[in-house]
Image (cartoon, coloured by chain):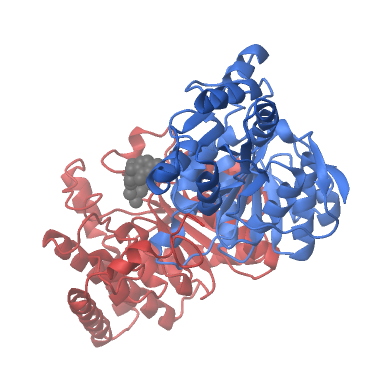
Amino acid sequence: MAELSYRDAVARGLAQEMERDERVVLIGEDVAKAGGVFKTTVGLYEQFGPTRVRDTPISEEAITGMIMGAAMNGLIPVGELMFSDFLATCWDIVANQIAKTRYMTGGQVELPLVIRTANGGGSRFGGQHAQSLENWAMAVPGLKVVAPATPADVIGLMAAAIRDPDPVIVFEHKALFATKGEVPDGEIVDTLGTARVLREGDDVTIVALAAMVHTALDAAKILGGLGISAEVIDLRSLVPLDTQTILNSVAKTTRLATVEENPRLVGWGAEISSLVAEEAFWDLDGPIVRVTTPHIPLPAAGELEDLAIPSVERVVDAISAMSG
Amino acid sequence: MEIALDIRLAMYDGMVRARYFEKRAYDLFMQGLVKGTTHLGLGQEAVAAGFAVAMQPDDMSYCTYRGHNHTLLRGAPMNALMGELMGRSNGICEAKGGSMHLTDVSKGAMGSYAIVGAHLPVAAGAAWAAQLRGTDQVSVCFFGDGTTNIGAFHESLNMAAVWDLPVVFVCENNLYMEYTAISDVIAVEHPAADRASAYGLEGIVVDGNDADAVYEVAVAAYQRARAGEGPSLIEALTYRHKGHSRADPGKYRPDEEVEEWLKRDPIDIYRERLLSLGVEPAKLDEIEAKAAAEVDAATEASKNAPPPDPAVLLTDVWADGGSSWRN
Ligand SMILES: Cc1ncc(C[n+]2csc(CCOP(=O)(O)OP(=O)(O)O)c2C)c(N)n1
Ligand SMILES: [Mg+2]
């Protein structure tokens, strides 16, 4: 066991897999010699050399298209998109090509690739460098989607993503890069499609993802003081979705709240809410509550961004209101 | 370059098979037996033949929705291609791809891509893997003149050039995008060749209706790629005999232009050449008769094939064979 930052966990997860399998390669803008603009790939170029860790031009379509082609011809490529907002520049490759090719070819093409990208707000970057876009990826059949909340999960889910034969997008949260957590020694390999109950409770189930997991945990502590026992689930993976963990929890607590950083409409929590409404309606003792960013582009100023992204206070208020 | 007779006959055979296959596809579309859409490469067969015949079996080709000929000429079975156009259970993609997505990975036909430009970086990526793994494969990417104005073209050319990738980009310049002439939308004469210098590449223009000329540039480009000297960008001048897709009559093209190009039919040109080289007419008749019979058989087999099993609707989203999104 040792303490490790989320940022360093990215490099450790990648290094673990690159050491294990020489087919694993990494490309992206500034990922090699500079170690990444968020310093998430520091040391990989030195360790694995210029053919396996490679800087690219500013060409998002080429980065994503080339990892697709490389995956068709025997590599397990990892491509970095510096900010998830840039997914919009290569969405054709991601959503039309990478996601659909296996299906459209009747299963002829396997694409064991990973797209890693820095996602989420809290850094005062404004509307084009701060979005939480995991729900875009969730909406496309053929993409697997994970968003780790802790350094240990970064390593384990990165390894699982790289070992998975399907395309996986790993959303790394910018606001978490500097956070630290205990990480076991040795190899860490997790399982896609598994949520985790981080705090047990009886009165309400809070489902959260990535940075919002920490917001939910802080809120649960305060709610405890108010006599509300909240169970917090870290979803970790949107596709596949661990519906069982959610349904089991709601069966026990009878209430559901989601805490989402994405803007309101068609956020991932809408899918969770619909799932619970369809399959666990009779377990519920009250309306489902979604705490989300309002349906707005993210503003730059700290005061405004903090108002936009769900805060501990908003989560506490929303949940105490539903339980009252 | 002296081109061996067996290579020449293979190119003729390929062009004739592609021609007959696509003529049948057109008829079946008009009869309502091929639904959706088709984009025929009628008139452009020499490009497909020259490049395909010069490839090694494990080379990889990437093409567009106008890719029946390219897929067929890599060796994909005609039955399964016809079945795919007709949406039957014998289709090469289980009837889930359709005319615009013909693929036969087992033959190195790595897919037909229907978003303009999308497959250029994919072809470059396959070449990158070949380079890293030292496989000696070449990746060949076919696209149209209109494709040279989309970002992915420039991103891919630059990256392939900077990384010395063994990829050959082939622009089939048929003078039109859908209904608009390429000359209306570019500032240079040659949409591909005139841009080559921006990537440190030679601008190569070839007569795309002359299979021998195409074959020669293909051989040279593959050699360069295999020697580690990097990509090539080749512009093949050609013309589509029919409209852009489906039943498009192509009325936006001047009659004289169409007539001129029809006189330069790549198959007629090549038949003449083979005869002048001393090939017996009977040999060519035999190739044509065989191709006609093959198309008839593929049509019959596909007409008789059952519709797709409803079960395939939910297969092959994931590597586990299924489509479940939940645990
Ligand atoms: C990104 C994108 N934009 C537009 C289209 C619609 N479209 C399909 S084919 C085509 C023309 C392409 O022209 P060209 O590259 O010359 O190829 P050709 O059809 O002549 O073979 C267009 C505009 C598309 N499929 N993808
Ligand atoms: Mg064209």
- Residue B87 pos. (x, y %): 25, 65
Q: Taking A281 as reference, is A316 left or right?
A: right
Residue in front for this viewpoint, A88 or B106:
A88
- Residue B95 pos. (x, y %): 30, 65
Q: Taking B116 as reference, is A218 left or right?
A: right
Corner quadrant of residue B34? bottom left
Q: Which chain is blue?
A: A
Q: Can residue B193 be seen in this view?
A: no
- Residue B211 pos. (x, y %): 38, 67
Residue in front for this viewpoint, A80 or A123:
A123
Dividing the image into four quarters, tell me where ligand 1 lies.
top left
Corner quadrant of residue B263? bottom left
B29 relative to A40, above or below? below
B122 relative to A311, above or below? below
Q: Taking B235 as reference, is B35 left or right?
A: left
Q: Colour of chain B?
A: red
Q: Which residue lies furthest to the left in this view?
A: B31
Q: Which residue is drawn at 31% across and 84% down?
A: B279
Q: Residue at x 44, y 48 (%)?
A: A96
Q: Which residue is drawn at 45% across and 61% down?
A: A102
Residue in front for this viewpoint, A267 or B63:
A267
- Residue B169 pos. (x, y %): 51, 54
A42 relative to A106, above or below? above
Give the number of marks.
0
Q: Which residue is drawn at 59% across and 36% down?
A: A84
Q: Is residue B184 visible?
A: yes
Q: Residue furthest front?
A: A227
